[in-house]
Amino acid sequence: MTVYNNMHDFDIRRTEQLTDILPGLLQPVISQYDEVYSPNRLAGIGISFHGIVNESKELLYSPPVQIHIQPLLTKPKDTFNVPVYTDNNANMAVRAEQAFTAYQPNLYCVTLSSGIGLGILLNNEIFPGFTGYAGGVGSDI
């Protein structure tokens, strides 16, 4: 069930613009969530990125332009006082599939955009593979 849906256009080459507007975009979502699911409150925020996110949650590569994600993670954490989780979009998608469909401990999810991503969930854990990027099936790298 979708609680809130909003789209906002911005220049992907200006990540500082997104950093400044992100809390304002999230506030209506969080307010609506808190209203619908009271007394439960927001436990965390998840932000996914197209590209390679390493185990330190650094975006190593994101076509077509490089995005600096640390401000995108810090601002919501400071504004809403909750943890912010991030990962590759395919890994986050497989987690969402597990959470919002019939629960399966082993699952995979394919994402298609400028590349092909594969989120692999084995025994409830993201499978990183030998190098940490097992789901990087294909990209425009």
Image: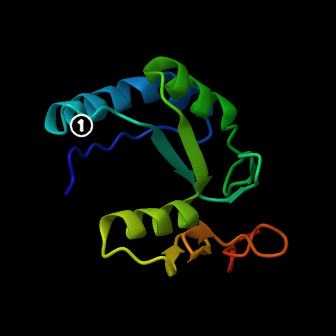
The one of 8 and 40 positioned closer to us in this rendering: 40
Left or right, residue 85 beside residue 1:
right
Task: Mark 1: give few (<14), some (14-19) or many (20+) Cα within 10 Å.
Answer: some
Is residue 50 rendered to the left or right of residue 21?
Answer: right
Position of 45 relative to 118 (above/below): above
Q: Secondary structure at mark 1?
A: helix
Report x, y in % for residue 10: 46, 38
Q: Quadrant of the N terminus?
A: bottom left
Which of the 4 image quarters holds residue 67?
top right
Q: Where is residue 44, by image quadrant?
A: top left
Q: How many marks?
A: 1
Given residues 80 and 116, the one toward you in this image is: 80
**Left or right of 101: which side holds 98?**
right
In front: 10, or 53? 53
Q: Position of residue 37 (x, y in %)?
A: 19, 39
Determine the residue located farthest toward the left in the rendered image. 36
Residue 127 visible within the image: yes
Name the quadrant of the C terminus: bottom right
Say if 58 sits above or below 21 in the image: below
- Residue under the point 69% across and 74% down: 136
The amino acid marked with disc number 1 is: Tyr
Q: Where is 15 relative to 12, above or below?
A: above
Q: Which residue is mark 1?
A: 33
Residue at the image point whose x is 26% and y is 35% from the top: 40
Most distant residue in the right direction: 131
Evaluate whether residue 114 shows in this view: no
Rendered position, 71 above or below 55: above
